[in-house]
Amino acid sequence: MPHFKLLLVASLLSGLAATASGNGSVDLATGSSHPQIIQSLVRKVEAMSLRIERLQAQLAQEPCKGRFPTFETSIPVVMKYAGCNSNVLRNTTTNIQTCQNGTFSIYNTNNTATTGLFDIQIAVNDPPRNDVYHFVCTLTTDEPHVAFCTLTWEEPSRPEGPAWLNIRFKAMTEPACTPTAATIVGTYFYDFATNAAGVYSFYARVP
């Protein structure tokens, strides 16, 4: 870190010299013409160095913060979930709220570490229907622990309306960065194949 400070000082002083060379207002050899400018630059360098040191310490304490989660590639990652949803049927004004539970599985993760892409399924514990919803998802380097997903197909097979969900992975194991919990927030819309619009929030955890 001291070397980094010196580089910052050299860079700032070089910029100052270039700025002042035309009017001779600063004597870099002695700093006697405008010592307050030099002191101000040093204070800025110290503040920047302190901030970088704090960021480095934070990263050391949270090694998974800037990385995609790591998923088992040979078998799906399975979590138990529970939560509630609220929806309104088409051409009505009644809000219907219900709760549910089931399993949340992550699969097709062979390339997730490089692309951020993977699939999930939400299997609802609602016998005898046993509904299962499949989504394709992506992570981004901007928010590596937050996934954005869209519905692709359902079991039993039926026409699908549009549905989106957001997954926030949490409780990472270290150093593998494997999530052991997730918060899932979703929404669906009126469509030719969907007679309700609604939202839901589920909380999942590895059993």
Image (cartoon, rainbow, N blue to C red):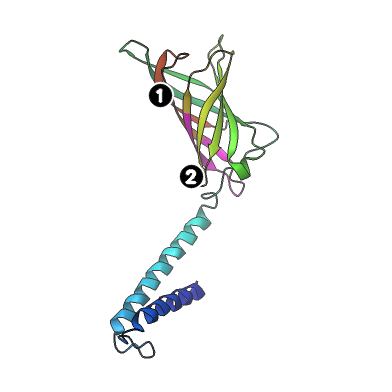
Is 31 above or below relative to 199?
A: below
Amino acid marked by disc 1? Val
The percent position of residue 179, horizontal first and vertical second, equals 56, 39
**Residue indicated by mark 1:** 199
Pick out the residue farthest to the front.
22
Identity of the residue drawn at 34% across and 10% down: 91
The answer to whether residue 96 is seen in the rendering is yes
Amino acid marked by disc 2? Glu
Pick out the residue farthest to the top.
128
Say which quarter of the image contains residue 17.
bottom left
Q: Nearer the viewer, residue 201 or 194?
A: 194
> Magenta stretch: dominant SS?
strand
**Residue indicated by mark 2:** 143
Is 19 above or below relative to 63?
A: below
The percent position of residue 86, horizontal first and vertical second, equals 38, 20
Q: Please provide the residue range marked out in magenta.
A: 165-181
